[in-house]
């Protein structure tokens, strides 16, 4: 093949790819690749055609900008073409722009520019005749767009009638339709709730919303409009400057970005660009750069146009926030509270101004929802200081060798069992006191005021002690000497001996405090007190079995036995039973309970069906099935038992529990709660905890509701609570209220 033929073949391939992605982007509103990737393809084709002009074709995508209008909307010819904007991808390119402007205008001094944030939305033209909105059209290919008047009429920030009376009889304004962040999040939450597709980013959501054939759907979508310029104007001259024209538009009731500024010279352009790059996070809408426009209209006219872009305007883009890369592996990190988080190790990629090689996958539900496999090509997004995130998988590019991500059964740090309860998004290491990843937090908690109350043992000190390997677990605290402590940073002889004295005092505690201090998942002060009261001694607590606490009714036993007998293939171990579809109530805790009582499924089936039933021996207020499992699991771990033995050997003790000393009704008696959205613990667990404090937990919000606890993606209940002005708490707010965490 000659070079020419090779170039032709390559150009053909690029054109096909570009056309395909144009279709996904403009017609389906469902881009498969990030803009940065698209831009690369486009530039590659442009470069190729520049190098071999003879291979250029009239229908090459480089010969037109934008997409062809969708058949379903009526076509609109723009009275004046909707131009495109040249990009400056660097400060140098920006300096070139300013130099060209000054040269063409033969200007000695600096040029005044209007600087505007570059809104990342959909370009639109609105026509007002005699002050009334008569037509709204998308940009389309710049010459012809789609008539979306009915849809645009539903957008609140678009005035249907202009204010005042000094507007031109025919006025076309140009602007962008955007979806504010808050509305975008709410829309995606709603889509998820209804099992419908979610949008990758606000721009796609805005596009998808505007191009609905049913205006009622658009009306329901949180869109906004901001204008940045003029199209066709008849019958009445406009001002001499762009800044003046924007002011006029504003006076007629049209929304114009309040972020705009009038800057003079390149230096001020650069500083506006820097400021906006930082302010970007705080804005209600996505922006992807700054647009600079020569302010004087006479100068604009003198400068004119090249191809489809004005010479008097330029878009300086921020670094792309979305890129494509590959998932090399998925590792699991253990946080200080034991939460096990999947993290994608990525082929390093430059995104949002930095090189990213890791991205959080949050939790296993997210991994499943996004369907991330090892080996996948993914969209990675990094917005500002936000932690990089895997947004979406490109299923078309999944290799055959892609591997499913699996939650490890054991902690990568301490090898303890990882537990993830049904309905709970977060998996946790059960290592607690033993897990090095959790040590610092566990010991801080142990020493806290409401736990062992060790005075003078602050967070900083705990960190030092662990980093210097002077302690590994709470029991080691009691072996610290004045000499050892006095050698530490910011510790004198005096404070060291004070601390040793405080430790001596803290040894003598109460059983509820001791149980609370162990930092067992879900066991707050109130539950700890209830457990202490119900069991009386630590030994009794440590000997608890699930069968002491969890009920399986006779009817349930019969049903389960029957279901298992019907199954042809039996799992060897009862624990492998897991939750059963056919029996709604049968959960992980019940499976664990049966595993405690029967060695294998064969034994279980040989037993009389009623033997599967279980009557709990003890009822501990506030301890439902989920907490029961957490409690029993904690005390089953040998390393936890070891630390407890060491603590007792170090002289930690408490008076016998007097049933009467246990506190009476909870602080939340008479309060009604509603839980909504995704919370970091299963709702039943939170419900149990609230009930233990005397609260009522109901399913729907009414004027009788005292608090709504809203997690992420909270939907209609949250909206209702806001409408009824019910107090809304996030998880931290709840923790503060109930004095937990
Ligand atoms: O905020 C924007 N996205 C924006 C887009 C803006 N602030 N100004 C713009 N100015 C123009 C010219 C100078 C050509 C009138 C634009 C656009 N054009 C534009 N938007 C989409 C294509 C072109």
Image (tube, rainbow, N blue to C red):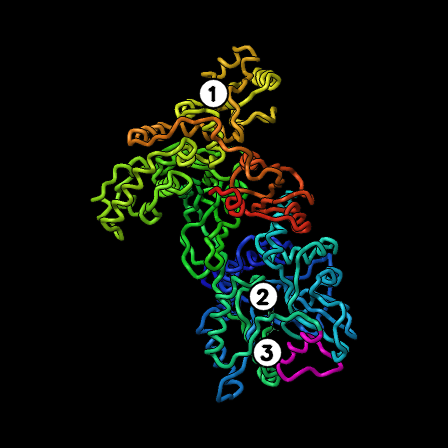
> Is 506 placed left or right of 135 in the picture?
left
| Residue at 57% across, 71% down | 259
Q: Is residue 22 above or below residue 358?
A: below
Q: Residue 603 at what x, y percent from top left? A: 48, 13
In the image, the segment drawn in magenta is 231-252
Dot 3 or dot 2, earlier in sequence: 2
Whole-Å distance between the Cαs marked 3 and 2?
Answer: 22 Å
Q: Quick one: label 3 or label 1, which is nearer the N terminus?
A: 3
Tag shown at residue 525:
none
Residue placed most toward the observer, 63 or 260: 260
Image marks 2 and 1: residues in contact by CB distance under 8 Å: no
Frontmost of labels 3 and 2 is: 2
Q: Secondary structure at mark 3?
A: strand
Q: Earlier in the sequence, mark 2 or mark 1?
A: 2
Return the residue at label 1.
595
Counting from the top left corner in percent of width and height, residue 267 is at 46, 78
* Mark 2 C-beta closer than 8 Å to ligand 1: yes
Q: Dot 2: within a 10 Å radius of its alpha carbon, few (fewer than 14), some, or many (20 or more) residues? A: many
SS under mark 1? helix
Q: CA distance from mark 3 to mark 1?
A: 78 Å
Whether residue 351 is situated above or below residue 244 in the rendered picture: above
Residue 119 is marked as 2
Q: Is 466 positioned to the left or the right of 2 in the image?
A: left
Residue 529 coordinates in the image, percent (x, y) = 47, 32
Ligand 1 image-quadrant field: bottom right
Q: Residue at x 31, y 41 (%)?
A: 502
**Dot 3, how many residues are within 10 Å of its Cα: few (below 14), some (14-19), or many (20+)?**
some
Query: Disc 3 vs disc 2: Cβ atoms closer than 8 Å?
Result: no
Q: Residue at x 73, y 75 (%)?
A: 171
Question: Looking at the picture, how far across and down is residue 107, in whole percent?
Answer: 51, 88
Per the image, the residue denoted by label 3 is 305
Q: Residue placed farthest to the left in the image?
A: 483
């Amino acid at each position: 093949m000659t070079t020419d033929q090779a170039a032709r073949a390559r150009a053909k391939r690029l054109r096909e790819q570009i056309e395909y992605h144009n279709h996904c982007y403009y017609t389906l509103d469902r881009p498969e690749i990030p803009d940065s990737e698209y831009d690369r393809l486009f530039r590659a084709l442009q470069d190729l055609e520049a190098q071999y002009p003879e291979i250029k074709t009239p229908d090459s995508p480089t010969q037109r900008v934008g997409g062809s209008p969708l058949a379903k909307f009526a076509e609109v010819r723009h009275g004046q073409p909707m131009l495109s904007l040249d990009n400056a991808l660097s400060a140098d390119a920006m300096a070139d722009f300013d130099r060209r402007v000054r040269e063409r205008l033969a200007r000695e001094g600096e040029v005044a520019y209007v600087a505007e944030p570059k809104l990342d939305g959909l370009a639109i033209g609105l026509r007002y005749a005699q002050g009334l909105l008569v037509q709204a059209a998308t940009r389309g290919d710049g010459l012809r767009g789609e008539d979306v008047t009915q849809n645009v009429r539903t957008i609140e920030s678009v005035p249907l009638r202009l204010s005042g009376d000094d507007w031109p009889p025919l006025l076309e304004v140009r602007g962008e339709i955007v979806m504010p962040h808050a509305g975008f999040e709410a829309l995606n939450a709603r889509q998820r709730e209804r099992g419908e597709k979610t949008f990758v980013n606000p721009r796609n959501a805005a596009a998808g919303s505007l191009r609905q054939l049913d205006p009622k759907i658009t009306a329901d979508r949180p869109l906004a409009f901001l204008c940045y310029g003029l199209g066709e104007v008849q019958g009445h001259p406009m001002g001499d400057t762009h800044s003046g024209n924007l002011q006029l538009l504003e006076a007629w009731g049209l929304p114009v970005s309040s972020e705009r500024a009038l800057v003079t010279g390149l230096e001020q352009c650069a500083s506006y660009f820097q400021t906006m790059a930082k302010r970007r996070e705080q804005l209600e809408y996505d922006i992807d750069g700054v647009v600079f426009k020569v302010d004087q209209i006479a100068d604009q006219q003198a400068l004119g146009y090249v191809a489809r872009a004005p010479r008097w305007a330029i878009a300086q883009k921020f670094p792309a926030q979305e890129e494509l890369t590959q998932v090399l592996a998925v590792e699991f990190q253990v946080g200080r509270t034991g939460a096990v988080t999947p993290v994608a190790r990525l082929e390093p990629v430059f995104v949002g101004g930095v090189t990213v090689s890791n991205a959080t996958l949050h939790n296993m539900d997210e991994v499943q929802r996004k369907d991330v496999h090892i080996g996948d090509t993914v969209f990675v997004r990094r917005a500002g200081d936000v932690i990089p995130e895997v947004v979406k998988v490109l299923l078309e590019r999944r290799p055959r060798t892609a591997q499913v991500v699996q939650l490890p059964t054991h902690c990568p740090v301490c090898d303890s069992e990882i537990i993830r309860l049904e309905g709970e998004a977060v998996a946790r290491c059960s290592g607690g006191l033993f897990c090095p990843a959790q040590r610092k937090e566990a010991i801080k908690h142990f020493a806290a005021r409401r736990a062992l109350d060790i005075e003078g043992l602050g967070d900083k000190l705990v960190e030092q002690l662990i980093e210097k390997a002077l302690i590994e677990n709470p029991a080691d605290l009691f072996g610290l000497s004045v000499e050892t402590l006095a050698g530490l940073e910011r510790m004198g002889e005096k404070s060291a001996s004070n601390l040793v004295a405080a430790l001596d005092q803290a040894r003598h505690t109460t059983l509820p405090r001791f149980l609370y201090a162990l930092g067992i998942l879900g066991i707050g002060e109130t539950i700890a007190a209830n457990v202490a009261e119900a069991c009386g001694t630590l030994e009794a607590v440590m000997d608890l079995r699930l069968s002491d606490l969890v009920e399986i009714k006779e009817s349930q036993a019969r049903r389960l036995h029957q279901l298992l007998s019907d199954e042809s293939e039996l799992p060897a171990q009862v624990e492998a039973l897991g939750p059963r579809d056919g029996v709604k109530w049968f959960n992980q805790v019940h499976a664990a309970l049966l595993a405690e009582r029967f060695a294998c499924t064969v034994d279980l089936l040989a037993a009389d069906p009623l033997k599967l039933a279980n009557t709990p021996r003890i009822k501990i207020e506030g301890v439902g099935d989920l907490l029961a499992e957490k409690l029993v699991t904690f005390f089953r771990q040998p390393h936890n038992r070891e630390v407890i033995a060491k603590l007792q050997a170090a002289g930690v003790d408490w008076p016998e529990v007097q049933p009467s000393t246990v506190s009476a009704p909870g602080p939340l008696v008479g309060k009604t709660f509603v839980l909504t959205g995704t919370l970091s613990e299963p709702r039943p667990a939170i419900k149990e905890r609230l009930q233990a404090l005397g609260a009522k937990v109901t399913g729907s919000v009414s004027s009788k509701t005292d608090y709504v606890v809203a997690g992420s993606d909270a939907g209609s209940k949250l909206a209702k609570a806001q409408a009824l002005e019910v107090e809304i708490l996030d998880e931290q707010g709840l923790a503060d209220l109930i004095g937990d965490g």
